[in-house]
């Protein structure tokens, strides 16, 4: 086993009365990541911090009621022990307490947690942990404490939830998954569920693979997959089609020049955004929707592309190009769950602000029926021009530059 590189490994401590429950963390990708020194996982037995013959961790609740409550003292000693272990990064852990009463565990939260140097998990059993442990951890130990729930159902304890969370977070730590592109092309990364997948044989048990997948027509395959994703999301998770729960509030959004490393995420973001345009304009015949990964990569050389990131997540983009004295602003997009919060306007202003001397007009295209986009552009001073449609169903808007 490789010794974890303290500067690189993400540290994970788990405290439980059933440490054996966490044995699966030795297996598969997470086990491999531990061997490779990418994750430094340590499991602790809460009962090691009791001092009575029965190693008691629980007692009856004040005020009455069913079940038992975990006593504060063993938890306090366990946390002190975790904090006192060698800690080369100088960081403090973010304490995660799994419980059905917590904030929902989502891919977005997994991404945030994957950026932390150190996570500590406190697995409660019975009815839960004495509330004063949370206050003590926050106020005396100075820890950020989050209660996190896997979903709206009840488990017997936090251990299964920790297995799920460590797997979801661990696979986002750089290097744990070899092919980073596979990370963005999956459910919950761009607001839609995945399309159905098939492998050989072509006919199995009298069932054929959908014809389009054998056609070799990549545009047709992409359009079919997109339709499947939309249909599936509408049927199984209609809430995702109107996702308004994610928020930019309180998170800094940084705009930076796009690099080749941004291309896979940018490609997925564009798909997610122009699916909306496809629905709003009732057509799949939109160039942005048909851009391949290679097209997006190539566009970095022919345009100036900017990406906006929030807590590591790519949440918006825009590209500009000069045509004589006109500055064309293209592919302006904001992640569907974060629209309506002014991020599009910020990207637009950034695109305008980067225009060189000699530019006299800004211009852009959008769908003729893209009501939200049109409203935003008009508010920003753009006017529809009576030019031939750049592509079927699209319109051109122009604004004079004021200097
Ligand atoms: Cl994170 N813990 C427990 N004990 N029950 C749960 C849960 C977590 N998420 C859903 N049910």
Image: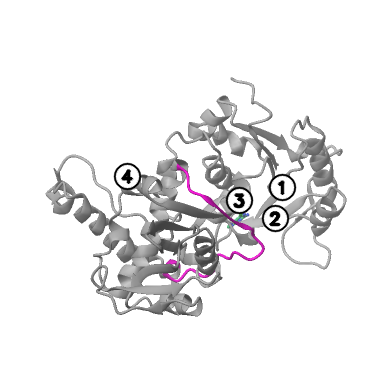
Q: Are discs 3 and 2 less than 8 Å apart at CB?
A: no
Density class for disc 1 (Cα within 10 Å; few <14, some 14-19, many ≥20) is some
What is the spatial separation of the Cα atoms under label 1 and label 4, in whole angstroms? 39 Å
Q: Which quadrant of the frame does ligand 1 lie within?
A: bottom right
Q: Are discs 1 and 3 less than 8 Å apart at CB?
A: no
Density class for disc 3 (Cα within 10 Å; few <14, some 14-19, many ≥20) is some
Residue pictured at 24% horizontal, 58% vertical: 223
Q: Residue 51: where, in percent of width, then height? A: 86, 38
Q: Residue 111: where, in percent of width, then height? A: 56, 49
Q: Quadrant of residue 152?
A: bottom right
- In the image, which residues are magenta? 240-259
Q: Which residue is mark 2?
A: 146
* Residue 300 left/right relative to 141: left
Q: Which is more toward the observer, 252 or 350?
A: 350
Marks 4 and 2, the one that precedes in the sequence: 2
Q: Residue 294: where, in percent of width, then height? A: 32, 44
What is the spatial separation of the Cα atoms under label 2 and label 1, in whole angstroms? 8 Å
Marks 2 and 1, the one that precedes in the sequence: 1
User: Colour scheme used in the picture?
Assistant: one colour
Q: Which residue is mark 3?
A: 112
Residue pictured at 40% horizontal, 70% vertical: 238
Q: Decide: is 152 above or below 185.
A: below
Q: Are discs 2 and 1 less than 8 Å apart at CB?
A: yes
Density class for disc 4 (Cα within 10 Å; few <14, some 14-19, many ≥20) is few
* Residue 335 left/right relative to 72: left
Instruction: Indicate which disc residue 94 carries.
Output: 1
Whether residue 212 is in magenta: the answer is no
What is the spatial separation of the Cα atoms under label 4 and label 2, in whole angstroms? 41 Å
| Dot in front, 1 or 3 | 3
């Amino acid at each position: 086993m490789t010794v974890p590189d303290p500067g690189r490994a993400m540290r994970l401590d788990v405290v439980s009365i059933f440490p054996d429950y966490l044995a699966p963390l030795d297996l598969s990708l997470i086990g491999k990541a531990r061997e490779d020194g990418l994750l430094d996982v340590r499991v602790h037995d809460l009962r090691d911090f009791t001092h009575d013959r029965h190693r008691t961790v629980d007692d009856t609740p004040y005020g009455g009621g069913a079940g038992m409550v975990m006593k504060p003292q063993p938890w306090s000693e366990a946390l002190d022990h975790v904090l006192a272990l060698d800690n080369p990064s100088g960081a403090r852990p973010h304490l995660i307490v799994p419980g059905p009463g917590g904030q929902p565990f989502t891919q977005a939260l997994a991404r945030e947690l994957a950026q932390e140097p150190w996570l500590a998990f406190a697995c409660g059993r019975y009815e839960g942990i004495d509330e004063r442990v949370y206050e003590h951890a926050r106020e005396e130990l100075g820890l950020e404490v989050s209660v996190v729930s896997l979903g709206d159902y009840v488990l017997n304890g936090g251990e299964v939830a920790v297995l799920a969370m460590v797997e979801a977070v661990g696979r986002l730590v750089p290097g744990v998954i070899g092919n980073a592109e596979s990370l963005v092309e999956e459910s919950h990364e761009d607001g839609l569920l995945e399309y159905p997948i098939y492998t050989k044989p072509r006919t199995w048990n009298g069932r054929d693979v959908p014809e389009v997948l054998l056609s070799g027509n990549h545009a047709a395959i992409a359009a079919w997959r997109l339709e499947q994703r939309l249909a599936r999301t509408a049927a199984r998770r209609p809430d995702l089609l109107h996702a308004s729960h994610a928020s930019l509030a309180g998170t800094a959004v940084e705009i930076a020049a796009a690099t080749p490393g941004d291309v896979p995420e940018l490609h997925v973001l564009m798909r997610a955004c122009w699916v909306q345009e496809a629905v709003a304009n009732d057509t799949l015949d939109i160039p942005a929707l048909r851009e391949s990964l290679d097209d997006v990569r190539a566009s970095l050389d022919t345009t100036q592309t900017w990406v906006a990131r929030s807590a590591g997540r790519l949440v918006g983009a825009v590209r500009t190009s000069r045509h004589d004295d006109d500055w064309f602003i293209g592919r302006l997009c904001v992640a569907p769950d974060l629209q309506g919060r002014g991020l599009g306007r910020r990207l637009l202003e950034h695109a305008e602000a980067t225009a060189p001397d000699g530019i006299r007009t800004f211009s852009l295209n959008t769908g003729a029926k893209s009501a939200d986009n049109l409203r935003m552009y008009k508010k920003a001073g753009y006017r529809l021009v009576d030019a031939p449609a750049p592509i079927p169903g699209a319109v051109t808007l122009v604004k004079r530059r004021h200097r």
